[in-house]
Image (cartoon, rainbow, N blue to C red):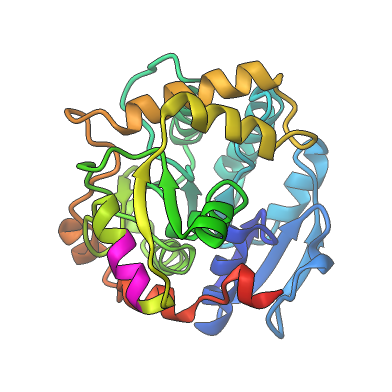
Amino acid sequence: MKIAVFSATGDQGIAQVREAAAQGHEVTAISRNPTRADLPEGVTPLAADYGDHDSLRRAMAGAEAVLLNLPSTSFQAAEPLLAAVRVIAEAAAGSDCLKVLVFNTSMPVPAERMGIAAQDARLEMREILMESGAPVITMQPVVYIDNLLQGWAWPSIERDNLLYYPHAETLDVCWISHADLGKLMVAAAGRPDLAGRIFDLGGAEAIRGPDLARRLSKVWDMPLRFESMPLDTCGEIMAEVFRGVATLDADVLAREMTKKYAWYNDPDDRPFFVDMGPVLKELPVEMTSLEDWAARQVLPARAG
C-alpha cells in the first residue's frame, strides 16, 4: 500500500513511518525537512509545509492511505493549522486513489467544546475532516509514556529520582507509547471499512502514579517516587520549556495548560482511561507492556 505520513520526522510520525516500512508498505515521509530524520531504507522523503497549501496537495498525490499527524495547538495559534486541515480534507475528498485518511489527534478530544483551546481546535479539525466526504478514521491517544523522557518531566527524574507529573495519585492513566500508536495507525490504514469511526486509544493497562514510579524503578534501577505536580506549576513549567518555540504568549500558554490538565484529572470524565478491548478486536495489534517499553529506552542521562 502507498502510505503518506505527515509530520513524519516528529516523535509520533517517525514511529508510524518505521512501522509502515517494516510491514513492507511503500512509504512517503512528509515533513518540512524530511532528510533530518534517520528514515528506514526505501522510504521516500518529501518536503511540504502546512503553510504552503500547494505542497500539501502535491504530497497527497497518489497516496492510498494518509496518516495525518499535526503540530500541537497547545503552544501555537490554531488557525494556520485549521486552514491546512481544510486543504487536506478537500484533497482527500477529491482523490481517486485514497482509500482512507487516519487522523491522529495526539490527545484526548471531548465530544463537545469545553473552552480549552487545544482540545477545541482538535475537535474542529476532526469535524472538518469527517464532514468533508473523505474516508476518515480518527485516532485519539490519551497520553504518551514517552513524555516521561521529555524536557518537562525528565529533569526531576534524573536530578531527584522524582516522577513529578500533573496527575492526581488516584488517577487511572492508560499510557500509550509512540510505537504502539504507530502499530494502530498502520493497522487502521488497512481498514477503510472503519471510515467514520473514532477510536480512543490507550496502553495495555491503567496505571496510577505511585505504581508507575514503583514499576519504572525496578526496570531503570532508580529509587523513583511519585509526586503530583500542582496544575499551576505545570502551566509555568510548560511555558518555560517551550519559550522560544511557542507562538502563544507565555501567560496564555500557562493558563491553557492548567485548564487542560484540570480536565485530564476530572474523576467523572476520566479522559485518560480507555478500555482497549473493543479497539483491539477491530485493530488486533500486540500492545507493549510498561516494563518492555521501559527496558527499550535509552535514557537521556545514560545517552549523554
Q: Residue 257: x and y, percent? A: 51, 27
In the image: residue 45, left or right of residue 163: right
| Residue 66 visible in the shown view | no
- Using the image, determine if residue 276 lies above or below residue 242: below
Q: Residue 170: x and y, percent? A: 20, 42
- Which quarter of the rendered picture does the C terminus lie within? bottom right
- Which quarter of the rendered picture does the N terminus lie within? bottom right
Quadrant assignment, res 216: bottom left
Find the magenta span and give its range: 213-218
In this view of the protein, which residue sits in the foreground, 173 or 68? 173
In the image: residue 285, left or right of residue 143: left
- Residue at the image position 44 percent from the left and 61 percent from the top: 185
- Residue at the image position 54 percent from the left and 18 percent from the top: 255
Which residue is outermost to the top? 115
- Residue at the image position 75 percent from the left and 40 percent from the top: 50
- Using the image, determine if residue 93 lies above or below residue 258: below
In the image: residue 289, left or right of residue 66: left
Residue 132 included in the magenta stretch of the image? no
